[in-house]
Image (tube, rainbow, N blue to C red):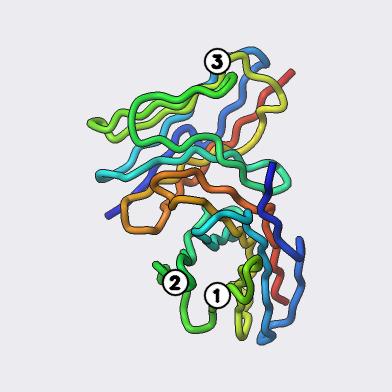
Amino acid sequence: EPEVTQTPSHQVTQMGQEVILRCVPISNHLYFYWYRQILGQKVEFLVSFYNNEISEKSEIFDDQFSVERPDGSNFTLKIRSTKLEDSAMYFCASSDQGREVSPLHFGNGTRLTVT
Amino acid sequence: KNEVEQSPQNLTAQEGEFITINCSYSVGISALHWLQQHPGGGIVSLFMLSSGKKKHGRLIATINIQEKHSSLHITASHPRDSAVYICAVDFGNEKLTFGTGTRLTIIP
């Protein structure tokens, strides 16, 4: 069965550094999402992306965050200047017809540790 | 305010028991998702539903739109069902709102 893949599985970075988290969604999917989960807390929505643009973003997704689909397969989340509170598990997800109609397929996550 | 509440927070049961996890939400929704989070952190989608009932193997999900309530049932529970089960609700605003999850432990 096709999978959403995320790399790296674990990233350690110093405060103030830029990080790029990478995701390869399922190939025929059109809707892409990033979520994060701070340790011990619930999963939170960050951003949704469709037709090469952001369709919705949360209050968390400030100017330090950006997303890009640089080619036909990758979907990236960039954090420009990481803070300690950005430490979390970041999940990429995709769906083929939008979340109200078709289920989400999640990647295994990237655990980001900011020191 | 769009809120999602799950109960119980933790549930321990013996192998073979029938399990019920509940999810309540505050306002009308477009869809509700049940997700399973493994101990390693990965998330798997179990069900997406907007009305009625769905069944997959030993798992059953139901939703009552009038009562703003959904349940996830596991029949003949097994230790491999041990995981965190998360209810996530689409309030129609493109932002999925997640519950805090129910940590299920099945003892052999």
Secondary structure of residue under mark 1? strand
* Kind of residue indicated by mark 1: Val
Residue B94 position by quadrant:
bottom left
Does the residue at mark 3 contact the one at mark 2 (Cβ under 8 Å)? no
Instruction: Say which element carries label 3.
Output: loop
Disc 2 target residue: A54
**Label 1 close to label 2 by CB (< 8 Å):** yes
Q: For the residues tagged 1 and 2, is the chain the same?
A: yes
The C terminus of chain A sits in image quarter: bottom right
Q: Which residue is mark 3?
A: B18
Query: Residues under labels 3 and 1: Cα distance?
Result: 43 Å
Q: Which residue is painted at 52% across and 61% down in the image?
A: A33
Q: Quadrant of residue B74?
A: top right
In contact (CB < 8 Å): disc 3 and disc 1? no
> Across the whole image, how many numbered discs are drawn on residues?
3
Q: Amino acid at mark 3?
A: Phe
Q: Chain of mark 3?
A: B
Which residue is identified by label 1?
A67
**Which is more toward the observer, B99 or A52?**
A52
